[in-house]
Image (cartoon, rainbow, N blue to C red):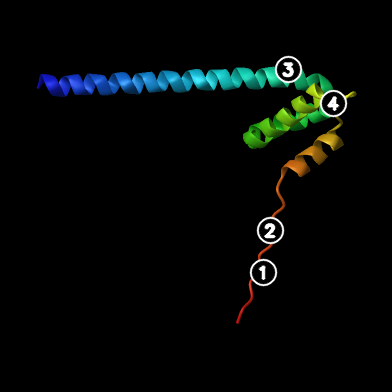
Amino acid sequence: MELEELKKQRLEQLQQELLQKQMQEQFELKEQLEQLEAGAKPFMSPEAIARYGNLKAVHTEKAIQSIVVIAQLIQERKIKEPITDDQYKNLLLRLTPEKKEFKIHKK
């Protein structure tokens, strides 16, 4: 009976440690994203920021990918004035892979 209790306690302890580790990683990722946003948003027009916010709510990964690209361009000093909404749209289009068309032939 004691062995089973020890196993159960150890399992619970490992699950708790894993949960804490995952929460810490999520916190760190959120913090990194906030830093990227803080650095990139001053280089974006209000319309582009609004589009980013909408995209972040719907397609989080694509929004993060776009803000990383903007941060890299800023770091490389390739952005000198705020990105307009049209420029942001073009960036998003370039980040989106082209869809392949499938033709179905009936015999």
- How far apart are the alpha carbons under marks 2 and 4? 33 Å
The three-letter code of the residue at mark 4 reads Ser
Mark closer to the chain start, 3 or 2: 3
Q: Position of residue 35 (x, y in %)?
A: 68, 17
Question: How many C-alpha atoms fall within 10 Å of the one at disc 3: few (<14), some, or many (≥20)?
Answer: few
Mark closer to the chain start, 2 or 4: 4
Q: Residue at x 18, y 19 (%)?
A: 6
Is label 2 in contact with label 4 (beta carbons under 8 Å)?
Answer: no
Question: How many C-alpha atoms fall within 10 Å of the one at disc 2: few (<14), some, or many (≥20)?
Answer: few
Residue 40 in which image quadrant:
top right
Name the residue at the front extreme.
76
The three-letter code of the residue at mark 3 reads Ala
Q: Position of residue 52 (x, y in %)?
A: 74, 30
Element class at badge 4: loop
Element class at badge 1: loop
Is label 1 in contact with label 2 (beta carbons under 8 Å)?
Answer: no
**Residue where numbered disc 1 is placed:** 103
**Residue where numbered disc 4 is placed:** 45
The three-letter code of the residue at mark 2 reads Lys
The three-letter code of the residue at mark 1 reads Lys
Q: Position of residue 81 (x, y in %)?
A: 90, 24
- How far apart are the alpha carbons under marks 1 and 4? 41 Å
- How far apart are the alpha carbons under marks 1 and 2? 10 Å
Is label 4 in contact with label 3 (beta carbons under 8 Å)?
Answer: no
Mark closer to the chain start, 1 or 4: 4
**Residue where numbered disc 3 is placed:** 38
Is label 1 in contact with label 4 (beta carbons under 8 Å)?
Answer: no
- How far apart are the alpha carbons under marks 4 and 3? 14 Å
Element class at badge 2: loop
Q: Where is residue 106 in the image (x, y as percent from the top left)?
A: 61, 78
Image mark for residue 100 = 2
Element class at badge 3: helix
